[in-house]
């Protein structure tokens, strides 16, 4: 079982994450963490703060000589601006001076947080509610990704919509092309759509506005049977949806074709099952279900779409609000912000997906050491392969025919999924 907890404020001294349940013997270095933290700062439309908010990473506990110990891993991500600007405003000591923020931003946690916790200063809410917290989650997710790589699992993401611009449906990258997604300034594999997205960001930036969008998260080579149909809280799609919806500014998640499937007839909504005699595997060559059926991974690519709303902080104060001190109508205050954070959100979504899948893999395979974990996985995979390849002729019907409307040559032609 994998558990983690983050702590820290956006402009505080540091963020901290403690991750428990990682087997002993996993190779892990600061470079492994820094790769994804650097990717989180990518993307056309990010604000100037990305130049200042460098991630100063320290592995505090749980790793010795580049290998995990099996004990809780503690990671600290320092704030490079702390000493220069925020020591007084964010001081933990009584008597420090600060300026109250009393004009909460619509669409943010400010007002409800002030009411819930009886605060008279929105900064007490916004500092923790800030998406800066996701840096700690990305660090934890990088550890989960490192663990999953030993099972052959590859997790990535790409932007399929930014503002009103949508990428072509055939733009889904295969498992071996996930790293190339970052070559795009907006992390979109459709070159024509990329150009339109950049133009939309420039227009929004000029108007002082913000843009949302949709990211597709992909997990390749996930073992068959992670999750469970037995209990509601063990269903893999339910766990993924909750984790992805927990990302700041995310307002919608669909697994596979999700909402689109709801409008199709049943004959066109499901993934046909075939037996591949060469590999001895059952396959589904479409991804309507997103690689999850009955709450369990099918062995095909796991697909989730994650929708992010436009950021609630704008580069011009135009959103109507109320001053909580005077009750006068006014406009919300301005903080440093991005025009869009959709490309970066994809990296956070990868981390959340990795944490869920790694947790389910540890539940399934167990193991106190990396070697034991991998051996248990390999034994299970071989067991599934042997069971799948068996043909019981005694109970088999005399003949089995595909549905009359099923064309084997065209059944998988319309789906862009690439599964190695």
Image: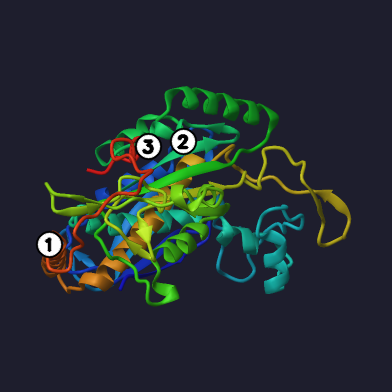
Closest to the camera, between mark 3 and mark 2, is 3
In the image: residue 376, left or right of residue 9: left
Within the image, what quadrant is residue 362 found in?
bottom left
Q: Residue at x 71, y 69 (%)?
A: 119
Can you give x and y, in whole percent of width and height, for residue 385 in the image?
A: 13, 60
Answer few, some or many: residues within 10 Å of disc 2's Cα (few below 14, many 20 plus, some between 14 and 19): some
Of label 2 and label 1, which has the lower sequence position?
A: 2
Can you give x and y, in whole percent of width and height, for residue 370 in the image?
A: 15, 65
Report whether residue 40 is seen.
yes
Can you give x and y, in whole percent of width and height, for residue 188 in the image?
A: 43, 33
Could you say whether the residue bearing mark 3 is in a helix, strand or loop?
loop
Closest to the camera, between mark 1 and mark 3, is 1
In depth, the one of 262 and 358 nearer the eye is: 262
Of label 3 and label 2, which has the lower sequence position?
A: 2
In depth, the one of 213 and 30 nearer the eye is: 213
Answer few, some or many: residues within 10 Å of disc 1's Cα (few below 14, many 20 plus, some between 14 and 19): few
Within the image, what quadrant is residue 169 found in?
top left
Quarter occupied by the N terminus: bottom left
Q: Are marks 2 and 1 in contact (CB under 8 Å)?
A: no
Q: Are marks 1 and 3 in contact (CB under 8 Å)?
A: no
Q: Which residue is mark 1?
A: 391
Q: Which residue is mark 3?
A: 172
Q: Residue at x 36, y 45 (%)?
A: 404
Within the image, what quadrant is residue 319 found in?
top right
Can you give x and y, in whole percent of width and height, for residue 90 in the image?
A: 57, 60
């Amino acid at each position: 079982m994998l558990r983690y907890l983050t702590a820290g404020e956006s402009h505080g001294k540091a963020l901290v994450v403690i991750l428990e349940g990682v087997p002993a013997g996993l190779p892990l270095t600061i470079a492994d963490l820094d790769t994804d933290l650097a990717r989180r700062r990518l993307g056309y439309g990010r604000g100037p703060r990305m130049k200042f908010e460098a991630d100063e990473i320290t592995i505090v506990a749980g790793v010795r000589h580049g290998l995990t110990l099996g004990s809780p891993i503690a990671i600290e991500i320092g704030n490079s601006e702390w000493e220069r600007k925020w020591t007084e405003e964010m001081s933990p000591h009584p008597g420090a001076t600060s300026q109250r923020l009393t004009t909460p931003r619509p669409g943010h946690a400010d007002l409800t947080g002030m009411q819930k916790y009886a605060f008279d200063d929105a900064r007490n809410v916004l500092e923790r509610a800030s998406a800066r917290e996701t840096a700690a989650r990305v660090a934890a997710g990088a550890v989960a990704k490192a663990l999953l790589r030993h099972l052959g699992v590859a997790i990535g993401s790409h932007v399929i919509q930014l503002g009103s611009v949508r990428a072509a449906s055939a733009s889904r990258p295969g498992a071996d092309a996930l790293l190339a997604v970052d070559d795009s300034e907006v992390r979109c594999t459709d070159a024509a759509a990329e150009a339109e997205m950049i133009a939309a960001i420039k227009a929004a930036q000029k108007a002082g506005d913000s843009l949302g969008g949709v990211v597709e998260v992909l997990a390749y080579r996930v073992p068959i049977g992670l999750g469970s149909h037995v209990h509601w809280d063990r269903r893999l799609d339910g766990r993924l949806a909750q984790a992805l919806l927990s990302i700041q500014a995310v307002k919608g998640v669909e697994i596979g074709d999700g909402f689109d499937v709801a409008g199709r007839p049943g004959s066109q909504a499901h993934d046909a099952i075939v037996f591949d005699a060469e590999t001895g595997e059952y396959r589904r060559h479409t991804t309507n279900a997103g690689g999850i059926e009955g709450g369990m991974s099918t062995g095909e690519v796991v697909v989730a779409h994650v929708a992010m709303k436009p950021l609630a902080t704008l580069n011009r104060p135009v959103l109507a609000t109320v001053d909580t001190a005077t009750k006068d109508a006014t406009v919300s205050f301005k903080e440093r912000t991005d025009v869009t954070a959709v490309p970066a959100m994809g990296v956070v979504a990868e981390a959340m997906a990795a944490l869920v899948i790694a947790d389910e893999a540890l539940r399934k395979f167990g193991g106190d050491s990396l070697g034991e974990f991998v051996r248990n996985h390999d034994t299970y995979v071989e067991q599934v392969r042997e069971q799948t390849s068996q043909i019981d002729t005694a109970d088999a019907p005399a003949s089995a025919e595909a549905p009359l409307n099923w064309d084997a040559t065209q059944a998988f032609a319309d789906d862009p999924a690439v599964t190695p």
